[in-house]
Image: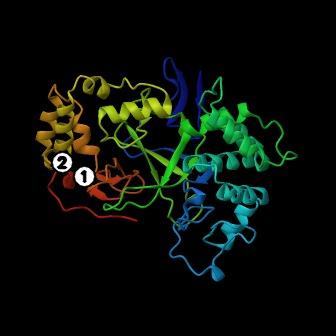
Amino acid sequence: MSETTSNPLIKVKEIEGRGRAVIASQSVKAGQILLRDSPILIYSSVPLQSGIPSNFCSNCFRRLEALVPSSSSITCHSCSINTLFCSPNCRSIALASSHSPWVCQALTSIRNSHSLSPDLQIQAQFLVSAYNLASFSPSNFQLLLSLQGESPTTQTAETLFLHSFIASLVPPQSFAGVSPELTAALLSKDKQNAFGLMQPFDKDKERAVRAYAIYPKASFFNHDCLPNACRFDYVDNIGDRNTDMIVRAIHDIPEGQEICLSYFPVNWNYADRQRRLLEDYGFTCQCDRCKVEANWKEDDEEGMEEDNDDEQMAGSKEDEIAVEEDGDFPHAYFFLRYLCDTENCGGTLAPLPPSEGTPDIMECNVCGRLRSHEEIDGEGSDGVMVD
């Protein structure tokens, strides 16, 4: 059975052993936009007890240009936590939806609690956002519950404690049916479907998450360690829908082929990839790349990573083809063509959409660097950074 989307390029289809998957419903050209999806829920990734001052809008999560004195900040007047907004309009939107009065009180309780670890604080913030979604947008709450993520048959002591804490904050007249089972189901949906909205790239710092967002359609994309599409977000752009996720084709995709994303940077090693997928998503990856790397020794893997960082990035087109045909690592061409070589970046390159640029201009989905194919092949300049 297939399910169509608003984009005629793709459809959702059940695949045996993989569940729901995104399939190319026609031939796709490199750089084409496969999906633009708006989040149904966003919540901060910063523990409220951390004391870290917020430098993002609490509604749209854009960077605030600078923290201004509290007397002139755009804040929530009834909030005792550090809730800042980039504009009066963002504050009005939030107060009518995601930052309702009971949410304000609940977040204050989370901040003042001494029994919640930093990780539990973040999970508590998600649950507050999810139960609030049930109040102001029941249809989106049902959409959240329809996403992948099996409900556990039994609840852990941690989940039961978290539910007890959240249930004490939820107004009973507004949320019927609050139960340990529903709380556990919501946490499962969050774990398997939330995407991180990242802080701006800085080669000298580890890139952190500013917020988590759940997108109803993007969750249909399965994982592959050598994906044929990648996600872009432009959270700091001016205008509406700045938190939308945009998925673009990395290269041409024939009709009928599954379209996959990588759930983490593609330059992670085999062991780290498998550990992350098993812990967070509950499966072991059997993609073509993993089948090759499963037989590598640890020192072979370390050597391959060094090659990716140095010599391979400077190779010519002829060198790329030779490496691609090498039986030791038949997928090396992907790293030469589509892995960004900006220091400490690890992003994936995809062509600009055909309507926005020439076909040979590649954009990194992490640092934003733009380069032509000639520059990637070592024949041009260092490229440019875009904000």
The local crowd at label 1, few if under 14, some if 14 to 19, many if 20 or more residues have their Cα within 10 Å, is: many
In the current view of this chain or complex, which residue is farthest to the right? 173
Tell me whether the residue at label 2 lies in contact with that at label 1, contact meaning CB atoms closer than 8 angstroms: yes
For label 2, the SS is helix
Q: Taking 309 as reference, is 267 left or right?
A: right
Q: Residue at x 64, y 33 (%)?
A: 157
| Residue 173 rendering spot, x and y as whole percentages | 88, 46
Q: Which residue is mark 2?
A: 313
- Label 2 amino acid? Met
Q: Which residue occupies the foreground of this view, 135 or 48?
A: 48
| Residue 39 rendering spot, x and y as whole percentages | 60, 49
Q: Quadrant of residue 177?
A: top right
The local crowd at label 2, few if under 14, some if 14 to 19, many if 20 or more residues have their Cα within 10 Å, is: some
Residue 197 vertical placement versus 153 (above, below): below
Q: Which residue is mark 1?
A: 341
Q: Quadrant of the C terminus?
A: bottom left
In the current view of this chain or complex, which residue is farthest to the top? 16
Residue 266 vertical placement versus 76 (above, below): above
Residue 261 vertical placement versus 37 (above, below): above
For label 1, the SS is loop
Q: Residue at x 65, y 47 (%)?
A: 124
| Residue 88 rendering spot, x and y as whole percentages | 68, 73
Q: Quadrant of residue 278?
A: top left
Q: Which residue occupies the foreground of this view, 58 or 237?
A: 58
Q: Quadrant of the N terminus?
A: top right
Q: Residue at x 60, y 29 (%)?
A: 3
